Image (spheres, rainbow, N blue to C red):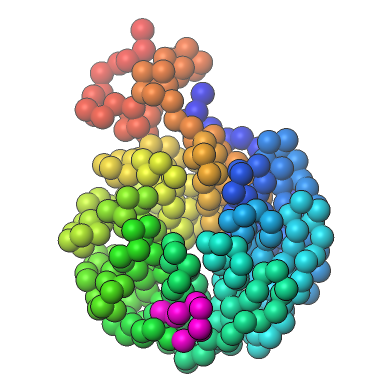
């Protein structure tokens, strides 16, 4: 049955696990931890692959190149390590930052790596040679996040200096400085259609920016705590936001109007992601749970329990059938989120468990909200 049921649980990290990402083919999972390691896991065999040792400090972020040939890990020792995921062997150590590396991202063509640091700079690196191409200077405080546009021509960065900056990735020159936030910027994301950038801030707002003009299109107001994460739906029509106010929310990108409030977490929500098909949203919370939501209605689909501490990050596999979550409890968990058709799911629940639907299952499989018994 597939209603958010747990799959493999991978123990092995010796400290909090901060970041998680799937390989492009969905067969390998990469994780970064405060135990000074990154690790690879074979998803199909439910087992560990090589440990990526060599970090002299905590690992904060991990990214897989789109071509599947490299993994980048940024951490607290001012360096970024590039690894070959097939062998687990190091390809290069990227040195140049003056403080910890908070975020890493590959360009769509896999040829460039962007790294954001607490030293206030961003660097672009040649992934083939490991050489620094250019240092992007202009932020006056730590840089929290980086994201490439889908065509790879523009890089967005968010910073503790309350600004978002856009950069030309070919030249390293600043294209625009976006200045409407009144507190630090924690998250940035491009829409797939290339028209809009979203930024989430400690000022409790998210802003939607018109990338042609560099002007704010819509100010997203409704959260009462910091906006920790922003994500666009595949069709670029919906923005999802997560917040320390214990909620996630859905917004109409065209109008900035709220579509749904995702209520259920009892503590900070740290991450929000869309399933690749756009029909389901996953959120990670400090209440030790992962929750699944219907992306159209905002209704809850499943509550995934098993972690025993804060859940820091979640990621869907490329086929959308599996969700990975990582936590301060040091565990990496996989969840079956394939979600069969409603009729099939209801039949499986009745036959397997010999009971009627729970509240979450009714929300997932009975769109009319009926409370009538469905099992014979």
Residue in view at x 65 percent, y 53 percent? 68
What is the chief secondary structure element of the magenta stretch?
loop
Quadrant of the rendering where the C terminus is positioned: top left
Would residue 237 be found to the left or right of residue 138 on screen? left
Query: Where does the magenta region start and end?
Result: 166-173
Figure quadrant of residue 52: bottom right
Q: Is 120 covered by the magenta stretch?
A: no
Query: Does any portion of residue 357 appear in the rendered image?
Result: no
Query: Does any portion of residue 319 appear in the rendered image?
Result: yes
Residue 161 in percent (x, y) is at: 43, 87
Residue in view at x 62 percent, y 82 percent? 133
Residue 322 in percent (x, y) is at: 55, 39
- When the figure is inspected, residue 248 is found, relative to residue 341, above or below; the finding is below
Residue in view at x 29 percent, y 82 percent? 180
State the residue in front, 208 or 302. Answer: 208
State the residue in front, 316 or 247. Answer: 316
- When the figure is inspected, residue 282 is found, relative to residue 32, above or below; the finding is above
- Outermost residue toward the top in this view: 376
Tag count: 0
Residue in view at x 45 percent, y 40 percent? 303
Q: Is 168 covered by the magenta stretch?
A: yes
Would residue 363 be found to the left or right of residue 122 on screen? left
């Amino acid at each position: 049955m597939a209603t958010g049921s747990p799959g493999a649980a991978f123990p092995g990290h010796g400290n909090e696990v901060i970041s998680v990402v799937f390989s492009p083919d969905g067969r390998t999972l990469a994780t970064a931890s405060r135990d000074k390691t990154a690790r690879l896991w074979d998803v199909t065999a439910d087992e560990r692959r090589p440990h990526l040792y060599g970090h002299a400090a905590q690992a904060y972020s991990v990214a897989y190149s789109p071509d599947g040939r490299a993994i980048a890990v940024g951490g607290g020792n001012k360096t970024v390590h590039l690894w070959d995921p097939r062998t687990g062997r190091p390809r290069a150590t990227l040195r140049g930052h003056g403080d910890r590396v908070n975020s890493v991202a590959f360009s769509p063509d896999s040829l460039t790596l962007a790294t954001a640091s607490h030293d206030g700079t961003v660097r672009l690196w040649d992934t083939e040679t490991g050489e620094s191409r250019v240092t992007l200077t202009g932020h006056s405080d730590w840089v929290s996040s980086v994201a490439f546009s889908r065509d790879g021509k523009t890089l967005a960065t968010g910073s503790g200096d309350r600004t978002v900056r856009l950069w030309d990735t070919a030249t390293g020159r600043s294209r625009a400085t976006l200045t409407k936030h009144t507190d630090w910027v924690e998250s940035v994301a491009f829409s797939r259609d290339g028209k809009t950038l979203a930024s989430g801030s400690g000022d409790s707002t998210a802003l939607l920016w018109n990338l042609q003009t560099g002007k704010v299109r819509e100010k997203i107001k409704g959260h009462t705590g910091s906006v920790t994460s922003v994500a666009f739906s595949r069709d670029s029509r919906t923005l999802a936001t997560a917040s320390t106010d214990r909620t996630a929310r859905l917004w109409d990108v065209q109008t900035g109007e709220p579509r749904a409030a995702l209520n259920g977490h009892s503590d900070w929500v740290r991450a929000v992601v869309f399933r690749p098909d756009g029909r389901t949203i996953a959120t990670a919370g400090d209440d030790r749970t992962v929750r699944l939501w219907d992306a159209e209605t905002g209704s809850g689909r499943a509550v995934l329990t098993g972690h025993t501490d804060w859940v820091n990050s979640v990621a869907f596999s490329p086929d959308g059938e599996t969700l990975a979550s990582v936590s301060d409890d040091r565990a990496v968990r996989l969840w079956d989120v394939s979600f069969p058709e409603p009729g099939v799911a209801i039949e499986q629940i009745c036959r397997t468990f010999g009971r009627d639907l729970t509240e979450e299952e009714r929300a997932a499989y009975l769109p009319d909200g009926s409370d009538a018994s469905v099992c014979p």
